[in-house]
Amino acid sequence: MEEKKIENIGKINIADDVVASIAGIAAIEVDGVARLTGGISKEVVSKLGKKKLAKGVEVSIVDGNVEADVSVELEYGNNIAKVSKEVQAKVKQSIENMTGLNVTVVNVVVSGIKLD
């Protein structure tokens, strides 16, 4: 198989909001997460078509390394540590797969429990 070399024809910049949206989508997809603290629930996501998912997520990108803070409300009855670790793993995997950036930190803040 012949390997083709691709020339560097320019720079690719990914906005912080794009990375934050990826993190928000990933977090809300984890079972046990009711919503992002910024007010985005699974029901709202389905109605909005996954727009404005950066609420409840803060990212910092320095030299291709991403640090993300994700604030979530969990559904009552779930193991907080287990769901939080799943959020960390899903956010890391999604950002790295979609952007090629290295995720060094994913902090999860559980800011509430949904009782219904």
Image (cartoon, rainbow, N blue to C red):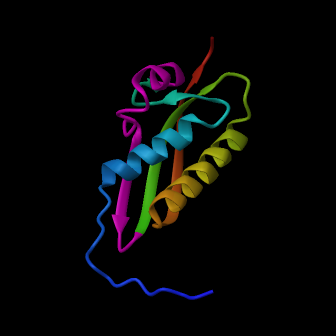
The magenta stretch spans residue 116: no
Q: Position of residue 26 (x, y in %)?
A: 54, 43
Q: Position of residue 104 (x, y in %)?
A: 51, 66
Asked if one can make out residue 78 in the rendered structure from this viewpoint, the answer is yes
Q: Position of residue 68 (x, y in %)?
A: 45, 54
- Residue furthest out toward the front: 1
Write down the region rendered in magenta. Answer: 41-64
Residue pictured at 49% horizontal, 57% vertical:
98
- Residue furthest out toward the top: 116
Q: Nearer the viewer, residue 19 or 97?
A: 97
Q: Vertically, is 37 above or below 104?
A: above
Asked if one can make out residue 105 in the rendered structure from this viewpoint, the answer is no
Residue pictured at 57% horizontal, 88% vertical:
2
Residue pictured at 63% horizontal, 11% vertical:
116
Q: Position of residue 110 (x, y in %)?
A: 55, 36
Q: Nearer the viewer, residue 62 or 22?
A: 22
Q: Is residue 86 left or right of residue 110?
A: right
- Residue 37: name its quadrant: top left
Q: Nearer the viewer, residue 96 or 69?
A: 96
Q: Quadrant of the N terminus?
A: bottom right
Q: Vertically, is 6 above or below 85?
A: below
The magenta stretch spans residue 49: yes
Residue pictured at 72% horizontal, 42% vertical:
82
